[in-house]
């Protein structure tokens, strides 16, 4: 083993939240917060950024492997509880997202092969790390999702890019509803490359539901999607449609409409522009308030009774949605 943690100064490494080693040309980084399902702190993001910068020019490193500690998760996302606390204490939260999005972009464009071992929970910020990897390996325990609308956010960390390029309307379904999918569905959607389970992967649900998803989620806006789902009467899809309507009813109405527009725009934007758009959107989410309310209701107080503004999808106007996409202050995000 050579060059393990030598010279590392990033807080994520010094705090033990990242473990790094290089052996026979393979650099391995372990996200090391298993009790928090390896949720990403700012120190972890900064540490991983520093490691990738160092390894890019290190002739001893040919391959980078990303993995999560423990047997439950690769990474369950960003540490949103810490972000909620920082914002309510008056601290600047923009830097977290600037560092995160720049890191995700770096992974997408890294000159050396990056392999993401995502057998376990991979959500939100974990998807940001995994989807930029050249090889994404899933297994029998993989549980993948972009559930951001449930907490008043949108599918960020590059979701504008990778969800909008999923076949048919599956990406819009995954972004709006946020269902958890397994290895088979991840492979079917093109969100994974290799299955490494002990047994052959079974056929997933999304392939079976694809005709209904493509039909209902091809509607011109979220209200029309809901209305289309409510009309579904075919026995093969009726229960799924009912459950999907119920799930959408629990989401932030504003962020459902914003997510619809985000993915519409993202489908034609290059990767860098997707991340720039998302940074403006996340700052707008803090201004609007549903993101903070969603974290409170689902993750802090856990009353599961978020008070969305507005409460009804019918009350979300085009002007409200457009305001999220207005230019905001320049940032220090390092994306070419």
Image (spheres, rainbow, N blue to C red):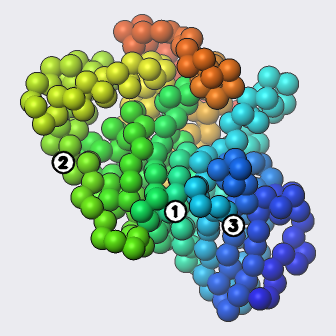
Query: Is residue 68 in sight in this rendering?
Result: yes
**Label 2 neighbour load within 10 Å: few <14, some 14-19, many 20+:** few
Residue in the image at 69% along x and 67% along y: 30
**Label 3 neighbour load within 10 Å: few <14, some 14-19, many 20+:** many
Question: Which of the pair 137/322 is nearer the observer?
Answer: 137
Give residue 92's position: percent from left, percent from top. Answer: 81, 33
**The residue tagged with tag 3: helix, strand or loop?**
strand
Give residue 39's position: percent from left, percent from top. Answer: 67, 48
Query: Is residue 317 in sight in this rendering?
Result: no
Q: Is residue 196 above or below residue 171?
A: below
Q: Would residue 203 be found to the left or right of residue 332 on screen?
A: left
**The residue tagged with tag 1: helix, strand or loop?**
loop
Residue occupied by mark 2: 208
Residue 78 is drawn in which quadrant?
top right
Residue occupied by mark 3: 30
Q: Would residue 194 be found to the left or right of residue 168 on screen?
A: right
Question: Which of the pair 158/186 is nearer the observer?
Answer: 186
Residue in the image at 24% along x and 32% along y: 240
Residue occupied by mark 1: 118
Q: Earlier in the sequence, mark 2 or mark 3?
A: 3
Q: Is residue 294 above or below residue 190?
A: above
Residue in the image at 76% along x and 42% along y: 95
Which numbered circle lies on residue 68?
A: none
**Label 1 neighbour load within 10 Å: few <14, some 14-19, many 20+:** many
Q: Earlier in the sequence, mark 1 or mark 2?
A: 1
How far apart are the two marked residues, 2 and 3, measured between alpha carbons? 35 Å
Q: Is residue 73 above or below residue 307?
A: below
Q: Is residue 102 above or below residue 8?
A: above
């Amino acid at each position: 083993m050579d060059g393990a943690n030598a010279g590392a100064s990033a807080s994520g490494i010094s705090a033990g939240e990242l473990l790094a080693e290089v052996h026979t040309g393979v650099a391995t980084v372990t996200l090391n917060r298993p009790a928090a399902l390896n949720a990403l702190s700012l120190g972890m993001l900064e540490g991983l950024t520093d490691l990738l910068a160092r390894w890019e020019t290190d002739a001893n490193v040919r391959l980078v492997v990303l993995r999560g500690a423990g047997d439950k998760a690769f990474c369950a996302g960003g540490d949103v509880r810490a972000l909620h606390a920082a914002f309510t204490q008056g601290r600047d939260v923009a830097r977290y997202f600037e560092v995160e999005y720049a890191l995700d972009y770096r992974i997408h464009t890294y000159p050396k092969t990056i392999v993401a071992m995502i057998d376990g929970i991979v959500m939100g910020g974990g998807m940001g790390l995994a989807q930029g990897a050249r090889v994404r390996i899933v297994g029998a325990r993989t549980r993948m999702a972009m559930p951001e609308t449930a907490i008043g956010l949108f599918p960020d960390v590059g979701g504008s890019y990778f969800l909008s390029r999923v076949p048919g309307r599956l990406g819009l379904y995954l972004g709006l509803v946020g269902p958890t999918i397994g290895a088979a569905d991840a492979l079917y959607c093109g969100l994974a490359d290799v299955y490494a389970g002990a047994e052959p992967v079974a056929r997933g649900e999304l392939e079976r539901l694809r005709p209904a998803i493509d039909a209902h989620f091809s509607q011109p806006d979220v209200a029309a999607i809901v209305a289309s789902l409510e009309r579904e009467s075919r026995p093969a899809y009726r229960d799924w449609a009912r459950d999907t309507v119920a799930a959408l009813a629990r989401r932030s109405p504003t962020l459902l409409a914003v997510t619809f527009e985000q993915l519409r725009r993202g489908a034609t934007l290059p990767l860098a522009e997707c991340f720039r758009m998302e940074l403006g959107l996340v700052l707008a989410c803090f201004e609007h308030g549903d993101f903070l309310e969603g974290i409170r209701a689902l993750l802090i107080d856990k009353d599961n009774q978020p008070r969305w503004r507005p409460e009804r999808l019918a009350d979300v106007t085009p002007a409200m949605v457009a305001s999220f996409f207005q230019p905001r202050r320049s940032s220090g995000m390092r994306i070419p």
